[in-house]
Every structure is written in structure tokens, then in C-alpha cells.
Image: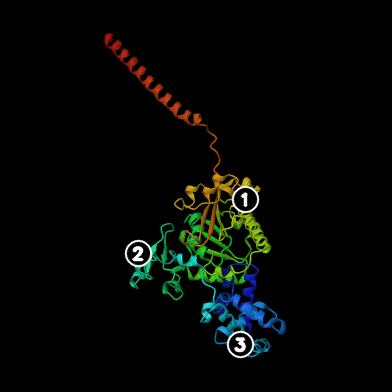
């Protein structure tokens, strides 16, 4: 029964908006993660039907031993829609079984009412946008070359054409190097390249932050990933750095930190130093991080459509406000590091309150002003990408061109947002006239030297003629 209690905690976190389905499940103990993910996802697909069945039978009112509605959802799901509750006999299981007949009757009544011929027809349909988003695979160049991966796929029957040309079709992405796009129906969970760490399943938009930050691949490089787990963006930074320099990966949650370390080990990231700590608690004055120049701080998920059944309310706005405040604090903290030159800020949100409005506040903060940090030019932020920020949300509308947005409806990727802050170069103290002055002086000097040479030449010839006229 402990398995069901742990799965109920996952649903509790999702209800509290403490993360996406993917991120919350990533924190589950690895031993139970796959099983928990399957139960949680399937339960969410039938959530509204299960809620109606439980309410109609008054299960929670009559059985006080079932103290959690989410626990009831999981148990009733397995009782009615699978091979039964996978747990030994106990008071909680017995409490559910006492209502088995009534629960089944209510399920059948709902099927008749909805005209469903099978239980499967009661499940919530997938987000229609997911079918238009390819299955993205990033080649882990810290372990394997893109050409090697492509040759491996072709040898197994895949065709280098287009992801929607056929189920076996795939293509190189036009924006992100080493990213391949496959048909969304293809699964890589057991693929040998995936299990060995040579490829990483990562949405295209999630690849933007590391690519835009573009840390140098030198032994002197020092980089921070402020919100690292589960590790996809960290491993991408590692690959771009060619496993050179030092890459500090922060994750405060103990379970997610364990996942991060496993992921980095699998991806053969040798230059990463995982840190089980909250980035906000790290002193920018700590000599360990004195040389840090690049900092990354943090997808509409394929599964998160399952959470959209909840009605929007004042709690949602409060949640967004809290997230925005937290994200702003992360940026401002990153701006305090003495040697920082670039800070990439990204979210998996499409809400302006978490995106443009946070950037706008960050730009006018004391930290940005004292650190001379401004938005990078659009030419340095994925210039070939067309969708940019919302001008109406920025204090200076033209700044929106420096921001990157992704729309799940139109960009064949999940919703995403990226901004890049850079250290402003100090103005050149020399004016244009002053810059021209040295050249002018040099020209004058050359002219004077030429004149002197001419005078000396004329004087020499005169002296020579005079000696010739007076030989003794």
C-alpha cells in the first residue's frame, strides 16, 4: 500500500502546482519511478470520471480510513480499470472493496450516459498540439558524434527525410545543431542509443537556453546551471563546453539531485560538479565562484494537458505571482556574481507575468544597473528564430526583439521563453576626432620626414657641387 501513498503524494504536488508532471515524477525514487509514472498518468486521464464515481458513491464520507481524495482516485482507478489494487489486504484496501459493486455500477451509468462503448473512450483525449510536435532527440556530443548517431538510425531502418513523412522519417533540426526530429509516435525509452546515454530526449525549446548562453569550451571556463535537475540542459551545456572547464550544477531537492547525478553520469559529463544546494543561498563573493562568467537559470509538457481540467481561479494568479517573484530573485542573484558576463533566463511558461514582466523588472533592478547588465542584441539571441517577445509588455518595446518565445500551436515545439542578459561594454572614452588624431599626426610626421629628406638631399647635392668646384 506504500506505493499508492507515494503516488498520492505526487498528485498532491501537482494539485499544489509544485511542478509539471515530468518534473514531479522525476523526484520519485528511481526504483518506483516508472510504475508510479504509469499509475499517475493513467489516473489523470480518467480523473474527472473517477471523481464523479467517488462522489456519487460517497466513498470518502462513508470510509474515514481513506483520508486522501487522491489516494481514493488511485485505488478506484486500479479497482475499476486495471487488474485490481496491487497491494496486500489491509484496512484501506478493504474499505474500497466494500463499495466495489456500487463503484462499478456508477462507472457503467457514466458510460451509458456518455455513449461510451469501452472504458478507453472515457479517457481524456491528448492535447491536439502534441501530435504536431516532433519527438526531438539531442545527440550527446560529449559521448557520440551526430554523424555516428544518424548512421546508426539509418542502419535500423530510419530514413533521413522528414519526421512526418513516415513513422521512420527523421530530420536534422534547422535551428539547433546536433538535434534530430522524429515522428511523435516513435518511442526511445528502450533504444540502445538512449539507454547508453548517446542520445538525450529533450524538447527543441528546452535546447535554446544552453545554445543561446553558448559558454566557451576552454579549460578556464567557469559556468553555473542554477536550476539543473533533471539534467538535460546541464548535459547540453557540458557538450557545448566539450567537457572542459568547470560547470557547477545546483539542485536543492535531495531526490531530484539524485536524479541529476544519475543523468550526468549516464551522459558522461566529466566537467560537471553537482551541488545539492539552493542557488539563492550561494554567496557571489565565495572565491569558489569568483571566476564564473556564464549563468543559466530557469515545457508546455506533452503530459501537462492532463492538468488543464482544473478550473482557473484566484489561486492560479497567486501561483503565477509567486513564481514570477522567485524567478526575478534568481536573476538578480545571478547578476551579483562579480565576473558574470552572460545570464540566460528561461521558463516553460507562455505567461507574460513570468516572462517579459520579469525581464522588465530585472533590467531596472539595482543589480542590473550596478553590474552594467543589459539585454543582448537580437543578433546574438537565435537571430534566425522569428517569434519574439511581446512589445506591449516591455518598458522599451524595441527590447522585445531580444527575447525568444515559442508557441506550441505554431512552432512545432513546447511553449517556452528565453532572455539573455549581457555585460554592457564600457563606452570608448575617445571621440571620433580623437581616434582620428593619431592617424593625422602620423600622416603629418611622415610628410615632415619626407620634406626633411628632400631638404637634406638638396643640401647634399649643393655641397657636392661646391666640393667639385674647389677640389683642394
Sooner in the amino-acid sequence: mark 2 or mark 1? 2
Q: Where does the C terminus fall, quadrant-wise?
A: top left
**Residue lying furthest top in this view?**
470
Q: Is residue 138 above or below residue 421?
A: below
Instruction: Find out whether the residues at labels 2 and 1 contact each other: C-beta distance under 8 Å.
Output: no
Residue 257 on image: x %, y %: 58, 69
In the picture, measured across the screen, residue 255 lies left or right of residue 380, that is: right
Sooner in the amino-acid sequence: mark 2 or mark 3? 3
Q: Is residue 396 above or below residue 225?
A: above
Residue 193 on image: x %, y %: 42, 72
**Residue lying furthest bottom in this view?**
89
Q: Secondary structure at mark 3?
A: loop
The residue beneath circle 1 is: 362
Quadrant in the rendering for residue 27 = bottom right
Residue, x 67% and y 79% (percent of image)? 55
**Which of 278 and 382 lies nearest the eye of the viewer?**
382
Q: Nearer the viewer, mark 3 or mark 1?
A: 3
The residue beneath circle 3 is: 87
Q: Where does the N terminus fall, quadrant-wise?
A: bottom right
Is residue 469 visible in the rendered image? The answer is: yes
In the picture, measured across the screen, residue 98 lies left or right of residue 447, that is: right
Crowdedness near tag 2: few (<14), some (14–19) or many (≥20) residues, C-alpha within 10 Å: some
Q: Nearer the viewer, mark 2 or mark 1?
A: 2
Sooner in the amino-acid sequence: mark 3 or mark 1? 3
Instruction: Find out whether the residues at labels 2 and 3 contact each other: C-beta distance under 8 Å.
Output: no
Q: Secondary structure at mark 1?
A: helix
The residue beneath circle 2 is: 161
User: How far apart are the alpha carbons under marks 2 and 3?
Assistant: 48 Å
Amino acid at each position: 500500500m506504500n506505493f499508492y501513498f507515494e503516488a498520492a503524494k505526487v498528485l498532491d504536488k501537482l494539485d499544489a502546482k509544485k511542478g509539471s508532471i515530468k518534473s514531479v515524477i522525476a523526484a520519485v525514487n528511481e526504483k518506483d519511478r516508472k510504475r508510479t509514472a504509469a499509475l499517475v498518468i493513467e489516473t489523470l486521464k480518467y480523473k474527472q470520471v473517477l471523481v464523479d464515481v467517488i462522489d456519487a458513491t460517497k466513498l470518502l464520507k462513508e470510509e474515514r480510513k481513506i483520508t486522501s481524495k487522491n489516494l481514493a482516485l488511485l485505488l478506484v482507478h486500479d479497482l475499476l480499470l486495471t487488474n485490481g489494487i496491487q497491494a496486500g489486504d489491509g484496512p484501506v484496501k478493504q474499505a474500497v472493496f466494500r463499495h466495489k459493486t456500487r463503484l462499478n455500477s456508477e462507472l457503467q451509468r457514466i458510460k451509458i450516459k456518455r455513449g461510451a462503448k469501452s472504458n478507453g473512450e472515457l479517457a481524456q483525449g491528448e492535447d491536439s498540439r502534441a501530435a504536431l510536435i516532433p519527438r526531438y532527440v539531442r545527440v550527446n556530443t560529449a559521448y557520440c558524434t551526430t554523424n555516428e548517431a544518424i548512421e546508426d538510425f539509418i542502419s535500423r531502418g530510419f530514413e533521413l527525410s522528414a519526421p512526418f513523412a513516415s513513422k521512420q522519417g527523421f530530420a536534422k533540426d534547422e535551428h539547433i545543431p546536433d538535434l534530430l526530429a522524429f515522428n511523435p509516435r516513435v518511442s526511445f525509452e528502450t533504444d540502445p542509443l538512449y539507454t547508453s546515454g548517446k542520445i538525450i530526449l529533450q524538447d527543441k525549446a528546452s535546447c535554446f537556453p544552453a545554445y543561446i548562453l553558448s559558454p566557451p569550451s576552454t579549460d578556464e571556463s567557469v559556468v553555473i546551471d542554477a536550476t539543473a535537475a533533471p539534467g538535460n540542459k546541464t548535459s547540453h551545456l557540458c557538450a557545448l563546453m566539450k567537457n572542459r572547464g568547470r560547470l557547477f550544477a545546483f539542485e536543492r531537492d535531495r531526490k531530484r539531485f539524485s536524479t541529476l547525478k544519475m543523468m550526468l553520469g549516464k551522459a558522461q559529463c566529466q566537467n560537471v560538479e553537482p551541488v545539492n544546494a539552493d542557488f539563492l543561498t550561494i554567496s557571489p563573493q565565495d572565491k569558489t565562484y569568483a571566476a564564473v562568467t556564464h549563468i543559466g537559470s530557469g515545457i508546455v509538457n506533452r503530459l501537462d494537458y492532463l492538468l488543464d481540467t482544473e478550473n482557473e481561479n484566484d489561486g492560479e494568479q497567486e501561483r503565477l505571482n509567486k513564481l514570477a517573484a522567485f524567478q526575478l530573485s534568481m536573476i538578480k542573484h545571478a547578476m551579483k556574481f562579480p565576473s558574470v558576463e552572460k545570464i540566460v533566463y528561461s521558463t516553460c511558461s507562455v505567461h507574460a507575468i513570468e516572462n517579459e514582466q520579469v525581464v522588465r523588472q530585472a533590467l531596472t533592478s539595482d543589480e542590473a544597473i550596478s553590474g552594467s547588465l543589459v539585454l543582448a542584441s537580437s543578433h546574438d539571441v537565435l537571430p534566425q528564430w522569428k517569434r519574439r517577445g511581446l512589445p506591449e509588455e516591455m518598458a522599451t518595446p524595441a527590447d522585445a526583439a531580444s527575447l525568444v518565445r515559442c508557441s506550441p500551436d505554431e512552432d512545432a515545439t513546447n511553449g517556452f521563453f528565453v532572455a539573455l542578459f549581457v555585460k554592457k561594454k564600457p563606452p570608448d572614452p575617445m571621440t571620433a576626432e580623437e581616434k582620428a588624431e593619431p592617424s593625422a599626426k602620423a600622416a603629418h610626421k611622415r610628410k615632415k620626414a619626407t620634406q626633411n629628406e628632400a631638404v637634406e638631399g638638396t643640401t647634399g647635392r649643393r655641397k657636392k657641387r661646391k666640393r667639385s668646384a674647389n677640389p683642394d
